């Protein structure tokens, strides 16, 4: 668990979804250049990290890469970096890219986990989200994946869409539970600045659901999935069992080192965090000239690291070590208060957020700041 | 500014009632700010040499003052007198009037004319030195007024030709009479279209019992009747008495701080004489100083060889701060001291208290410095360090009255650029404990253990309110609401009532005057006398937030008012305290008993959906920013209370 994780950012999409604020471009012609650059970047970090025990291909749309490109990519990684014996290798996938051939390829390349971006089974919602697949396609994709022997399937869903009724969402949840995937991510839609949805929100063309509804959705999602045997182990993440929790993502929440390759990717090692340029061109150019494609970095102070551990801890069922808050003035009293408010429980030397605690996770850390 | 009927523009005073000085009589006045530099402005103009006649010729001296109800034209008249004697030109005078108007447009500011020696030649060619002694300090506090009057032989009692006799007119008259001064009634502002001279003459005869034949009519603004005023001064006001060869006694009626020269004492010499090089002694403390300079006040200070019996002038003696001087103190010679001091000296005693806290904790030092600087010019302000669990380090300040408090507050804010929270002003309560001890408490933090309190008292005043008859009902209600008792009425003239009420001072210092003005549409005038302490049922009201007491919000109140105050505090806090993860219960309590409550509901959701590689830094930065914001909040228990919340609860209703 403490081994580093490897993230590769595939910054390409055929079309951009209006809610997404991850970096990607539709210029697929840049893929070869990007791959060349990536190859150079890998060399920089050759001996910096230990043995990676997770690889995560995210984006963008990693599955739009062709078989040649995917093969080359994986070869580059395995060639120049070191891995543990049995790494978790995840690829984010769009349902409209899933074919029998594709899944076979993925399996051959070593992928043992697929994170499928379904978002919704409701046609209207899918249209609203401008997804490139239909509900039927999503269904098909799941079938295909299952058929090819993947057991570690994760499905991504989105709730809190403007105007979304509880019943529609419940219907999606019921369906998901029927599919019984190893992992479910339920993301509340977040409208970030700079996205088309944000503009629409500003113009009043769409409305956010509001605090009460968001809270209600969160609670019922958590309750329903837990009732159906899932572990709600992080704010937006559910696993059927401990073994199917996302090994890679957990590293982010535990301050385990990770290396991020590709434009906009983030890395973290020994208290230093750095991130790459958010531009394919910039990324390629830098590496062409033999420079690191790093946009900026920061070295965490002890206080910053502590603050991060606090907020990351309150977002997972692992919670926060009690001694992390001990120095904070009035912490005993505050702890008493949030316990009696049902926001956290005390388990041994750890403070664990409850479902209600999850809802307020972002503000709990402030209660324990000096 | 109100527009009173008749198209006359009157100035309205938002200053609440002034609270008592040490003497029995208290004079209410609107808020007045000393505008520094007015005197200096005058002094930029050309000086007229000091015409001092023979050292022994006291017969050509007249010492007088102008007393009036607020805004009946005192300063304009003073300026006009100055102009008339040639100390300023007509044009300069007009400029000054315009200045005056400008500043007075900013509510309630009256420019203080300073004490000045006017050279006057009467119709028969006789020359005089007329010493116009103005009320010193930044306001006409009763004690200071009395010391100024004690330095005079006569007064001009000014009455506005349209407003007529007002509460202060009466009050000032009484004081002048107490000092056995010659009174010259003057009706001013006869130029106003709404002037009703005959009516006012009647009022003066009937209400003031002054002979209407004696009344001088004038318009300070227009400059009419001024010569008559001067003639009256020289003919009716007696010259000073006193022996130059007797030991020195000089009465300090004002002290001012000049950054270049130190303290400038204004005084009236009764007996004896003093000059540079003399060692003087201030009799109250016994401190001795060497005189550097003496002189008289013209547009500038004009040094002279000596000040002698009957003279009014200044003394500079190397004194560093005005706190070293006391208004009403007697100056005598160290080498030949007078056997007794002049009568009437009293130490200024604060009666209204408030704590001030800087808004940001790192401004404490700046606030401390500003207070120190301010005190250079105001001996009456007292302060000491104070601290509150909720608001941090601050100062507990004592003021001569609410007006004084307001002035200090305004000047600190304006001139020293300070921003701070001022707690609700409180009076000094007295508690008798079981063991017989008597405690004076103004700070709720020092409220004694209720189980050992045998009796409690609060200061009472007698209010006299002068109003047109038609407002009687409303005013009665106001006073009764404020725990007024023992009402009496007199009818000084048809259509007018003077209502007297005994009321607790605590009820008057919050916003009584404003309410009065408002319900009487500006016609009501108000004056009060301190009449001593009376038994009162007092309690201490605490405000609790999630069970934790918020010190700064505690208050000592009469038990009948506790609930009202508590409800108001709880409501205001509810609006100001931000939502937290948990419910916040706000309660008002007396002892252990909760008497009102309000709740701040918790917020419902605040978590963000994603938190992967790129999100972590961003999230942390946001938290860091919020942490910083938290620093500006006071933490009570685990509830974060912004400064604004305290301000909202604690500041006076009138804001």
Image (cartoon, coloured by chain):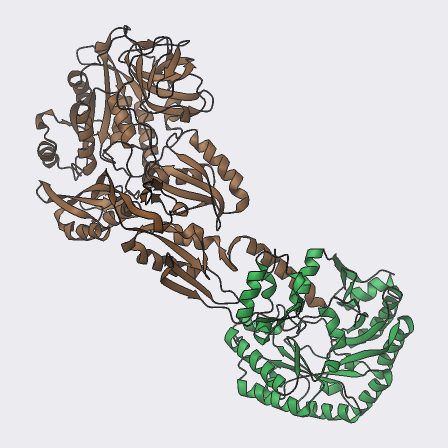
Chain colours: A green, B brown
Using the rendered view, name the quadrant where residue A2 is placed.
bottom right
Residue B311, percent from left and from top: 29, 14
Residue B32, percent from left and from top: 32, 36
Using the rendered view, name the quadrant where residue B40 is placed.
top left
Image quadrant where one finds the N terminus of chain A: bottom right
In the rendered image, the residue lying farthest to the right is: A79
Residue B145, percent from left and from top: 27, 28
Q: Nearer the viewer, residue A89 or B488?
A: B488
**Above-or-below relation of B374 to B12:** above
Q: Is residue B121 left or right of residue A111?
A: left
In the rendered image, the residue lying farthest to the front is: B435
The answer to whether residue A367 shows anywhere in this view is yes
Using the rendered view, name the quadrant where residue A32 is placed.
bottom right
Residue B319, percent from left and from top: 43, 20
Q: Nearer the viewer, residue B224 or B644?
A: B644
**Above-or-below relation of B510 to A189:** above
Q: Nearer the viewer, residue A98 or B191?
A: A98
Question: Residue drawn at (9%, 28%), measured in percent from left and top?
Answer: B212
Q: Is residue A235 left or right of residue B299?
A: right
**Above-or-below relation of B17 to B311:** below
Q: Nearer the viewer, residue A213 or A16?
A: A213
């Amino acid at each position: 668990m403490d081994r580093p994780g490897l993230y590769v950012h595939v910054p390409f999409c055929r079309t951009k979804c209006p809610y997404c604020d991850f970096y990607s471009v539709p210029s697929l012609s840049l893929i070869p250049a990007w791959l060349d650059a990536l190859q150079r970047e890998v060399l920089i970090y050759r001996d910096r990290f230990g043995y990676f025990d997770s690889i995560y291909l995210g984006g963008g749309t990693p599955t739009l890469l062709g078989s040649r490109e995917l093969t080359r990519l994986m070869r580059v990684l395995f060639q120049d970096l070191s891995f543990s014996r049995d790494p978790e290798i995840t690829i984010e996938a769009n349902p409209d890219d899933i074919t029998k051939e594709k899944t076979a390829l993925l399996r051959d390349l070593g992928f043992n986990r697929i994170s499928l971006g379904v978002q919704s089974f409701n046609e209207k919602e899918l249209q609203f989200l401008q997804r490139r697949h239909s509900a039927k396609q999503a269904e098909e994709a799941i079938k295909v994946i299952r058929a090819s022997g993947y057991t570690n399937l994760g499905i991504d869903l989105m709730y809190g869409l403007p105007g979304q009724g509880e019943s529609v969402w419940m219907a999606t949840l019921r369906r998901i539970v029927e599919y019984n995937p190893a992992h479910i991510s339920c993301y509340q839609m977040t409208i970030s600045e700079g996205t088309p949805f944000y503009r629409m929100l500003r113009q009043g063309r769409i409305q956010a659901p509001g605090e009460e509804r968001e809270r209600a959705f969160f609670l019922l999602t958590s309750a329903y999935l837990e009732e159906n045997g899932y572990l709600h182990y992080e704010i937006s993440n559910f696993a059927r069992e401990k073994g199917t929790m996302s090994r890679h993502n957990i590293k982010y929440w535990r301050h385990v080192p990770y290396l991020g390759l590709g434009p906009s990717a983030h890395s973290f090692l020994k208290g230093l965090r750095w991130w790459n340029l958010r531009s394919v061109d910039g990324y390629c150019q830098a590496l062409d000239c033999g420079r690191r494609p790093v946009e900026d970095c920061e070295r965490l102070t002890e206080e910053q690291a502590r603050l991060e551990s606090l907020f990351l801890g309150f977002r997972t069922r692992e919670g926060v070590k009690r001694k992390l808050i001990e120095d904070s003035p009035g912490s005993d009293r505050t702890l008493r208060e949030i316990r009696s408010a049902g926001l956290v429980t005390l388990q041994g030397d750890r403070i664990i957020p409850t479902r209600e605690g999850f809802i307020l996770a972002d503000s709990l850390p402030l209660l324990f700041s000096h | 500014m109100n527009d009173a009927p008749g198209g006359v523009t009157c100035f309205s005073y938002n200053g609440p009632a002034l609270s008592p000085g040490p003497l029995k009589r208290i004079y209410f006045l609107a808020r007045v700010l000393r505008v520094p530099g007015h005197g200096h402005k005058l002094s930029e103009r050309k000086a007229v040499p000091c015409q001092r006649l023979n050292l022994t010729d006291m017969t050509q001296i007249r010492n007088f003052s102008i007393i009036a109800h607020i805004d009946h034209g005192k300063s304009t008249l003073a300026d006009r007198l100055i102009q008339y004697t040639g100390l300023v030109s007509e044009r300069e005078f007009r400029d000054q009037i315009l200045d005056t108007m400008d500043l007075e447009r900013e509510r309630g500011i009256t420019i203080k004319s300073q004490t000045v020696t006017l050279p006057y030649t009467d119709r028969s060619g006789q020359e005089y030195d007329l010493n116009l002694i103005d009320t010193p300090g930044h306001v006409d506090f009763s004690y200071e007024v009395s010391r100024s009057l004690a330095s005079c032989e006569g007064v001009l009692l000014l009455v506005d030709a349209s407003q007529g006799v007002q509460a202060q007119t009466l009050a000032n008259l009484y004081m002048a009479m107490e000092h056995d001064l010659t009174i010259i009634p003057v009706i001013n502002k006869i130029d106003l279209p709404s002037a009703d001279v005959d009516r006012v003459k009647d009022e003066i005869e009937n209400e003031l019992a002054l002979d209407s034949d004696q009344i001088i009519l004038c318009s300070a603004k227009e400059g009419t009747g001024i010569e008559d005023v001067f003639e009256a001064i020289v003919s009716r006001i007696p010259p000073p008495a006193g022996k130059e060869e007797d030991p020195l006694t000089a009465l300090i009626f004002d002290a001012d701080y000049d950054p270049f020269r130190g303290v400038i004492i204004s005084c009236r010499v009764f007996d004896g004489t003093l000059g540079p090089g003399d060692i003087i002694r201030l009799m109250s403390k016994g401190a001795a100083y060497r005189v550097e300079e003496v002189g008289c006040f013209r547009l500038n200070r004009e040094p002279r060889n000596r000040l002698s019996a009957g003279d009014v002038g200044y003394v500079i003696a190397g004194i560093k701060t005005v706190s070293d001087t006391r208004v009403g103190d007697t100056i005598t010679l160290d080498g030949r001291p007078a056997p007794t001091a002049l009568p009437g000296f009293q130490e200024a005693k604060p009666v209204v208290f408030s704590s001030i806290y800087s808004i940001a904790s790192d401004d404490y030092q700046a606030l401390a410095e500003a207070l120190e600087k301010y005190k250079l010019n105001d001996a009456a302000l007292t302060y000491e360090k104070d601290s509150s669990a909720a608001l941090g380090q601050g100062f507990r300040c004592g003021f001569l009255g609410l007006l004084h408090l307001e002035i200090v507050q305004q000047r600190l804010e304006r001139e020293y650029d300070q921003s701070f929270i001022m707690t609700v002003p409180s009076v000094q309560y007295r508690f008798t404990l079981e063991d017989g001890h008597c405690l004076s408490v103004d700070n709720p933090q020092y409220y004694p253990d209720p189980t050992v309190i045998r009796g409690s008292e609060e200061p009472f005043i007698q209010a006299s309110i002068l109003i047109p008859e038609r407002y009687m009902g409303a005013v009665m209600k106001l006073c009764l609401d404020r725990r007024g008792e023992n009402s009496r009425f007199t009818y000084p003239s048809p259509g007018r009532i003077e209502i007297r009420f005994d009321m607790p001072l605590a009820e008057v210092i919050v916003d009584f005057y404003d309410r009065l003005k408002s319900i009487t549409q500006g016609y009501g005038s108000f004056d009060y006398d301190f009449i001593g302490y009376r038994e009162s049922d007092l309690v201490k009201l605490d405000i609790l937030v999630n069970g934790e007491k918020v010190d700064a919000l505690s208050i000592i109140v009469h038990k009948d008012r506790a609930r009202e105050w508590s409800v108001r505090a709880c409501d205001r806090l509810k609006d100001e305290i931000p939502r937290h993860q948990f419910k916040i219960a706000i309660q008002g309590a007396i002892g252990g008993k909760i008497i009102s409550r309000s709740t701040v509901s918790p917020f419902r959701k605040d978590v963000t959906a994603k938190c992967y590689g790129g999100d972590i830094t961003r999230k942390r930065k946001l938290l860091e920013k919020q942490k910083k914001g938290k620093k500006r909040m006071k933490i009570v228990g685990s509830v974060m209370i912004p400064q604004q919340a305290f301000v909202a609860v604690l500041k006076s209703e009138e804001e």
